[in-house]
Image (spheres, grey):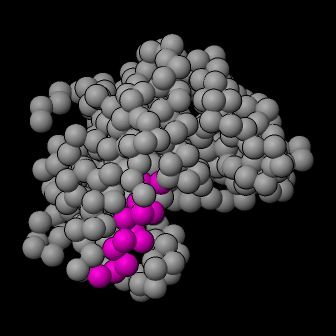
């Protein structure tokens, strides 16, 4: 594929309803997922699992980019092919998670800031040499009594802006991920308020830092009720509230918004995305950057067994196809298989 600049790369990732496979789980997180199927998490088992995903037929036409973990971008498949080359052969782009996790904010109980700016330029140069075409940095915003604070929001959004500028300076597209967590009993309205505050701060800081918005992707949460809230918003309300928040606070020139699933079930994440695309009325591509919501059924079908590879790949391919249809506003519940 011939992509000449960062704006073309950003547009390619989300073109024609394609989305992103988030396969950047840390080793501890991957370990928890493997525990659920009774498989030991080792470098080889993680490699085998991710190779299974990347070789699936559903990668083609449905996935425009894959976010990798540091271990994975360096790994080779069982036959010696670099995993990142398998991704490229499926006409998708390899990307890389570059943040270093969370650290408590002094004076802000219950709030965290994402770290990793120290040494980032050096790491980005190495990842660029591995032909990574885009990057990701995740900020975490909690809702609670008096939370989120302005200090937490502004510290996290400034870090996202600093990271994004460095990524672009190293010829990689930045994905900025300001995630307002579903954890808690907060209402839909409280999620809207926290998300809006985060987006206002984020885009002000991106502009001030000289980040090219046309060469950036946004990975936000949807506007949902907290998972412990007694009043859970329906699909149509989530779709309309999310679009209202985004259209008010996201620049038109942004090429794509790739939602995180944030703990939603596979089918619900797809239904929400489809409902938004059916509503329309926005300039950006509205797509997906799902981890668990793309992988869960495939992980369960795989179970760590070689003889289950084909069945697991079929599960992944189905979910990838469903989410592409949702990105085009063409998904229907009847398309799901039992």
Q: Quadrant of residue 7?
A: top left
**Residue at the image point whose x is 45% and y is 63% from the top:** 296
Q: Is residue 240 above or below residue 29?
A: above
State which quarter of the image contains the N terminus. Answer: top left
Q: Kindly tell me whether residue 75 is visible in this rendering.
A: no
Marks counted in the figure total: 0
92 magenta-colored: no
Q: Residue 261, image x and y in percent?
A: 54, 48
Task: Say whether residue 177 is left or right of residue 316.
Answer: right
Residue 89, given in percent of the width and then of the height, sits at 13, 50
257 above or below 69? above
Q: Residue at left 45%, top 49%?
A: 290
Image quarter (top left, top right, bottom left or bottom right) of the C terminus: bottom left
Where residue 133 appears, as percent x and y from the top left, is: 27, 42
Q: Main secondary structure of the magenta part?
A: helix
Q: Which image quarter: residue 14?
A: top left
Instruction: Identify the residue shown where x is 29% and y is 82%.
Output: 305
Which range is magenta?
293-305
Is residue 196 at least partly visible in the picture? yes
């Amino acid at each position: 594929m011939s992509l000449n600049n960062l704006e073309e790369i950003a547009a390619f990732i989300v073109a024609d309803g394609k989305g992103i496979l988030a396969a950047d789980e840390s080793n501890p997180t991957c370990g928890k997922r493997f525990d659920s199927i009774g498989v030991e998490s080792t470098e080889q088992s993680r490699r085998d699992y991710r190779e299974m995903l990347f070789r699936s037929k559903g990668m083609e036409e449905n996935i425009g980019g894959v976010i990798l973990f540091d271990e994975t971008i360096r790994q080779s498949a069982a036959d010696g092919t670099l995993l990142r080359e398998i991704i490229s052969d499926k006409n998708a782009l390899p990307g890389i998670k570059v943040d270093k996790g969370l650290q408590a904010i002094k004076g802000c109980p219950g709030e965290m800031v994402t770290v990793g700016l120290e040494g980032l330029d050096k790491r980005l140069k190495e990842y660029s040499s591995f032909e990574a075409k885009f990057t990701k940095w995740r900020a975490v915003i909690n809702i609670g009594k008096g939370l989120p604070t302005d200090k937490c929001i502004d510290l996290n959004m400034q870090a996202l802006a600093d990271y994004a500028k460095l990524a672009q300076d190293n010829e990689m597209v930045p994905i900025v991920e300001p995630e307002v967590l579903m954890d808690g009993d907060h209402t839909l309205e409280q999620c809207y308020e926290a998300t809006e505050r985060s987006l206002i701060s984020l885009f002000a800081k991106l502009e001030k830092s000289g980040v090219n918005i046309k060469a950036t992707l946004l990975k936000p949460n949807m506007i949902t009720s907290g998972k412990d809230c007694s009043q859970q918003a329906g699909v149509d309300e989530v779709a309309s509230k999310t679009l209202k928040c985004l259209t008010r606070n996201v620049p038109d020139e942004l090429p794509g918004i790739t939602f995180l699933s944030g703990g939603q079930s596979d089918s619900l994440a797809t239904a929400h995305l489809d409902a938004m695309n059916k509503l329309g009325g926005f300039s950006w591509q509205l797509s997906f950057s799902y981890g668990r919501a793309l992988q869960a059924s495939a992980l369960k079908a795989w179970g760590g067994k070689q003889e289950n590879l084909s069945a697991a790949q079929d599960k992944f391919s189905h979910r990838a196809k469903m989410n592409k249809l949702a990105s085009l506003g063409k998904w229907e519940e009847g398309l799901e298989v039992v």
